[in-house]
Amino acid sequence: MRRLKILRRWFGRRFGFSRLVCLALLIGIATLRIADFAPIEELRVRTFDFYQRFDPRVKTLRPVTIVDIDEPSLKKLGQWPWPRTHMADMVINLANLGALAIAFDVVFSEPDRLNPDVAANSMRYLDEMTRTKLRELPSNDQVLADSIRRARVVLGETGLPSAVSDIDKDLPFTGFASLGEKGSSEPHIYEFAGLLRNVPPLEKVAAGRGLLTIVPERDGIIRRVPMILLAQGHTMPSLSMEMLRVISGTSTILAKYDLNGIKSIGVKGLDIPTDKNGQFWVHFARQDPSIYVSAASVLDNTVPVDKIRGKLVLIGTSAATLNDLKTTPVAAAMPGVEVHAQVLEAALTRAVLAQPNYATGVELLGAFILGLLVIIFAPNLGPITLVGVGAMFATVLIGASLYFYREQRLLVDFTYPLLSTTAIYLTLIFFSFVREQAQRRQIRSAFGQYISPALVEQLAQSPEKLKLGGEEREMTIMFSDVRGFTSISESYKHDPQGLTALMNRFLTPLTDAILARKGTIDKYMGDAIMAFWNAPLDDNAHQVNACNAALDMLEKIDVLNKEREIEAQNGGHVYIPINVGVGLNTGVCVVGNMGSNLRFDYSVLGDSVNLASRLEGQSKEYGFPIIAGSKTALAAKDKFAILELDFIMVKGKKEPEVIYAIAGREDVALSARFQTLRNLTIEMLACYRSRDWDGALVSIERGRRTDVGGQLSYLYKLYEARILDYQTNPPPEDWNGAFALLTK
């Protein structure tokens, strides 16, 4: 079991689970085709029906005439069955007109009810002499038998679902012979438990005997007519096959076999292709009234001679009251006798259809090749290409099938290969859909806690925007931390649940502020938050959004502090405000899924990330809660109050960085007070970097007088201390104004 799991995982990684399922599906559908599963067969034969309606057989010769026991004949001669003497007269007249052979599509299974001896015994008021004379007359059956003896007549017999009596083995049967190597499976020849024959006087003298039973397929349509059948343990020819044997002058019908089953049924000079079960695919022509003559006209001897001379004559009925109507691919109601006529016409004019035994192998091979091509290449093709290739394959299959039908009269099924390939294609689509949905769920799960719901949904709908494994892109990074959180946590040392509630209380609005501005939460580190912009989705305004998020965070903390101060007053406990420091920096980073095979996170790495972290740590030194790197500040300078703070050298970096404070939004930037402070700060920094220590100190004093709120007090103290130190210990000659940070 363990080895099987390992093998399945290996196959799944190498080929994909969907391909494995499709391969199993390909084999499964092939098994159904070999077993000829009913729906598959139904689809196939319905397609062949369409071919026949689209391109029916065109009659070039009319070797068969039907003597029709039609409605006018019944009206003239009375209800059926007629006296056998009428049938005898009909046979004699047909023979005299030169009929090549005559076949009855009726069975004379009982003695004629109008035989003279029957009349003698049934009439009440006859004198004895008349009764004796009637009994001495030949029976109507004998009269018919005498006429049959003088012509080539084939009698029809019918199969029964059960045996009604033992068969008289002394009566004639047609001989059969077989040729060729038989396979391991026997053909499924139609078999009847019983056989209904004609009365013995007729059977003894007939030139042939054949089954007139036509077995419709499951849907009631006649497509194939068995040329040989089994009835009550005897091999029997069909009526039309026996008629062909009689006119060929041979005594035996030959069945040819190959390894798949029966290949053809034939007589001398004529070989009729069949399916493996001995059934003849009838190439139907449209109904042809010109081959019918009325039975009454034959008895009257008024039928045209050219309708009979040299023809095969079938005697049957088209009368609806006699209920011998069949459904065929080209007609909803065709007389059964015409079906026999169509078989004879198709066979004699060589206008036959054939579904060769190798056709199944060709269909299986085609389905297997196309299925493998779809399994191998479909997952790698785009939808438009795939539809185009699929349409091309379907066109080739349908075109090839139509070509074989029209030009070669071969029935080659395209529906099975097309069905198999379509099933595989739909399965691949299903698995692709399942994978896509799973990927979307995974994306929603992975990012739902870190980016806004709108961005999560956008990413789920377009997962290709998420490049897994890492990519380089310019991003804005944020680090935020709570100042003095140690003191706050100490006040909760006896209330850990309260500390947890407080953390959730301030982390939630800070997170909401980041997500609302299209940011992505990278991680929480205790009371600190790391976030970034411009990944996994593109954000052309990532610097502006990051600055807005930082200001929103300060505003939300102010609201929270006011709520906590009121709660502290009402509760009588100590109130310690929460102050947040934020570092922002923009630069090229590597972002993607990082970690191990067992656990990974969507995160970001790079020098720009490290600098953002350092800037957050410096916010308390400069007295501004939001400090940004130069790329961030300069990209957002038109929308925010930007104040240059310093030119620093971060530990571990070779290049110095100009850093800025984000002091407010555009309204602050446009205020006269901020404009004055910014100009004084610029002046102070210019003096400082040019080593004009006294000028820098003067600018600081002017700034303090202007800075009523003390917003720049930390900054002024920091520079004042540096200047005093430089006055005692001047910087080196190559000093560029950068200050090296000694701590991270």
Image (spheres, rainbow, N blue to C red):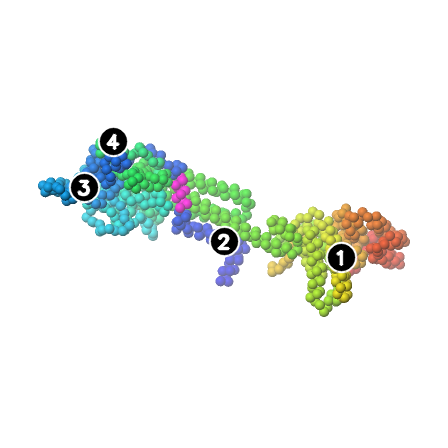
Q: Nearer the viewer, mark 3 or mark 4?
A: 3
Whichever of callouts 2 and 4 sits on the residue coming sooner in the sequence is 2
Q: Position of residue 731 (x, y in %)?
A: 85, 56
- Alpha-carbon span between mark 2 and mark 4: 70 Å
The front one of 405 and 66 is: 66
Residue type pointed to by label 3: Leu
Q: Position of residue 442 (x, y in %)?
A: 60, 55
Relative side of 90 to 431, left or right: left
Residue type pointed to by label 2: Leu
- Answer few, some or many: residues within 10 Å of disc 3's Cα (few below 14, many 20 plus, some between 14 and 19): some
Residue 320 is at least partly visible in this image: yes
Determine the secondary structure under disc 1: helix
Indicate which disc residue 303 carries: 4
- Alpha-carbon span between mark 3 and mark 4: 27 Å
The answer to whether marks 4 and 1 mark residues whose Cβ atoms lie closer than 8 Å is no
Q: Position of residue 397 (x, y in %)?
A: 45, 42
Residue under label 1: 558
Whichever of callouts 2 and 3 sits on the residue coming sooner in the sequence is 2
Determine the secondary structure under disc 3: loop
Residue type pointed to by label 1: Asp
Secondary structure predominantly adopted by residues drawn in magenta? helix
Indicate which disc residue 83 carries: none
